[in-house]
Image (tube, rainbow, N blue to C red):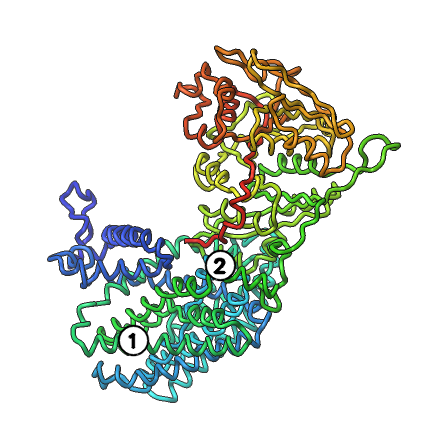
Amino acid sequence: METGAAPQAGVFSGLNPAQFNANNPIVLFIIQATIILIFCRALAVPLAWLRQPRVISEVLAGIILGPSVMGRIPGFKDAIFPDPSLPFLNLISTLGLVFFLFQVGLEVDLDIVRRDWRKSVLVAIAGMALPFGLGIAVSVGLYKLQGDPSVPFSSFLLFLGVAMAITAFPVLARILAELKLLRTQVGAITMAAGILNDCTAWILLALVVALLNATGGLEALWVFLTTVGFALFLIFGVAPLYKRLCVYTQSFEHGPSPLLMTVTLLTVLVSAFVTDIIGVHAIFGGFLAGVIVPHKGDLAIKITEKIEDIVNIIFLPLYFTLSGLKTQIGLLDDGTVWGYVVLVIFVACFGKIVGCTLAAKGLGMTLRESFAVGFLMNCKGLVELIVLNIGHDAGVLNDQIFVIMVVMALVTTFMTTPMVLWLYPPSYQKRVATETQEGLVEGYPKEPSIQPLSGKTIPDDRYCLVTMLNRIDAIPSMMALIRLLKQESLNGGSSEKKKPKRHIEIHALRLLELTQRASAVMKIKDSRETTRQDPVLNVLRTFASLIGLESLQTRLDFCPLSEYVQTVAHHGEEVQADLILLPWISSRYLQWDASSHPLEQHYLAGEWSSYPTSDVDFATQTFAIRHCTVGLFIDRGFGHIQDGDPRLTSASAFQVIIPYLGGPDDNAALLFALRLHMNRHVDVLILRYTHNNASPARAAVSHAGIVALLDSDAASETDPFALLLEEQGARSVNVTFQQVQIPLQGNCDMFASLPRPLGRHDLVILGRQVTQVNDLSRQLSVTNHPADTDPSNGSSYNRDVRAALGTLTHDILSMGVQASIVVIQAADPTARSTISPPVSP
């Protein structure tokens, strides 16, 4: 080992950067960390398709980089992972592990246990007692296989019992969040039982470590009692002072201040120092420091957000890769050892699954729900691997027993998600919730916005709109549109009768990304508090109160980015929505000139990132919803009104244009536009396009003054005006009709004949018409606009946009029309009830 100072000239002086130098270990450490992170991320991609937690990829990466696979390459270990460098790697990873256990302590929320502590305690006890007993039983054979009399059998059997009884709470919480089970009866009981199980396991592990590090029984007792005393000191002495500091620094209201974060990190380090010198592992100090942090004002979540990336992305992969480097699969070299592998896996699964399943069944849960609880509690995950590494480093487990236990941890973790999906699929959850009207365990308030309406009678006067509001910049335009949908009390002057009220029901979904971050799972667990504090939903609720909109239901949920549209589609089916309207704001296609409007420059100052996928993909996913009428709201500034604008006091200032070609999509767009007109007296102009040699369109008057604006070829029984007005009970509708002649040859500016140009506050409503492109719509295609063909044009809209939004919408965008646009696709009745609840990959 070279101990001299590294040459200052670096590689130019002939220095080999991969050669380990104890005085300058950073170069080799960077190489090691880079290789580890690349391997972990590469393995995580295929494992994500199998719905596996990331810890599996991290351990497998270590096994591949270790002596089992790449370690067999001559010179690989000595060049990349030389023995003198491992203490430095272990130091960094152990420091990261301390902060990870601090993060686990932050996740422990005793309020979850208090909600239904009796059931949780029963499942937790059953999930620990039986596995602990079976672990002690199997330890007899494993102790003989290890053949090391220097390790006391009492310590060995206690350690095996704890290892068998552990449930990985952090991984369990992540799985429950991904499978959308946190708000179900299964998820509520499993989460609370997992917290109790985890805390008990850490206490037992501290006892085992105290016994291992002590030279006699009395010394072990002193170690354990001192640890308990230090824990009580933190909980009853330090925690109140810490809370007072949070109040002093206003960290509950504004997030953790620099002073609070300094004190917090020092508390973690000092706690780790104390527990280590007492005689238990330093990670216990990190865990205890996390437990004392209050959860008021989402403080625990905000602290987690500040440290989780560096811990989870860099430190933990290093630790678990080191665990994999210790794992020598080649030690499983005969039938006896493999027999023990199978036995350990069977005992671990049998103890957890049977114990928890029987307890859950005794609580009145169905057989499928009970087995789901059992398999969830059987998840060992990264906590098991931490425990095994502690045992291996302490000399309790030799290399061979360590490998057997690692294989057991990987198998039990790997099987959790597939088995739960098979036993407790979303279809079964939906059926149980519908039949029993009980989706949540006692103590969790039901959310009326997620109650299915299947089988219920929908009132004829109900109009339900579902939307997704994920961004604050989409709020003004959507609020303006919702205000237009709200029906006025009178149909005209005071002498006229009040027209029948239609019950407008708005469901606003706020979807946040379910990431690999622990803070995302913590937000779901405390979703009631998160929902109350969410700025977007608070603004919308205040707006609804001001305009007198009674039926506004808001919901905040978490799911992967790729499932946003699917989640909205499923919710729309659950509440039997009349329209799903999604805002679409994109810097790539849909900006407008804000130079003359200083107020709007604020919105364009930052980067307007697109929705979860690309712009085109989001539109395509939206229009893949077929069970319900769906609209895409292309916001160009609709609702962004400045002081003094007459539109603040007059709804009629909004000009609504309907390019009408015919077909289901255009009829659906027409119905939506007429609803705005009848509710708020919005100016509606219908542009009916015909060839210059076609028979003129007629304005037929029927149904006591109902104006039907269809040409002579249309069937009267499908008159959309008559159908809408009959539903509304209205007597007449005063809209403007304009017939536009399209030349047989040449191109046409479809809005050239408008009485006034379209502005940003106007609205164009049209059907998507992707499957009904006829000769007339082709004639309207703006082929003479360079935007579709000239990539140098700043408003380029390619063929993908045309395919996603429809030809007519594509052409309107290419014309540079400033108005906002609503593209509507009619429902396909045959597609109803085909949407399955989304489950994240």
Residue 104 vertical placement versus 309 (above, below):
below
Kindly identify which residue carries mark 2. 426
Report the disc number at residue 394.
Answer: 1
The residue lying at 18 percent from left, 63 percent from top is 67
Q: Position of residue 710 (x, y in %)?
A: 64, 24
Query: For residue 758, which quarter of the picture?
Result: top right
The residue lying at 58 percent from left, 52 percent from top is 574
Label 1 sits on a secondary structure element that is loop
Label 2 sits on a secondary structure element that is helix
Report the disc number at residue 253.
Answer: none
User: Is residue 307 visible in the rendered structure shown here?
Assistant: no
The residue lying at 63 percent from left, 62 percent from top is 445
Horizontal arrangement in the rendering, residue 753 relative to residue 570 (left or right): right
Q: CA distance from mark 2 to mark 1?
A: 44 Å
User: Is residue 208 visible in the rendered structure shown here?
Assistant: yes
Horizontal arrangement in the rendering, residue 63 relative to residue 806 (left or right): left
2 or 1: mark nearer the eye: 2
Q: Position of residue 510 (x, y in %)?
A: 57, 47
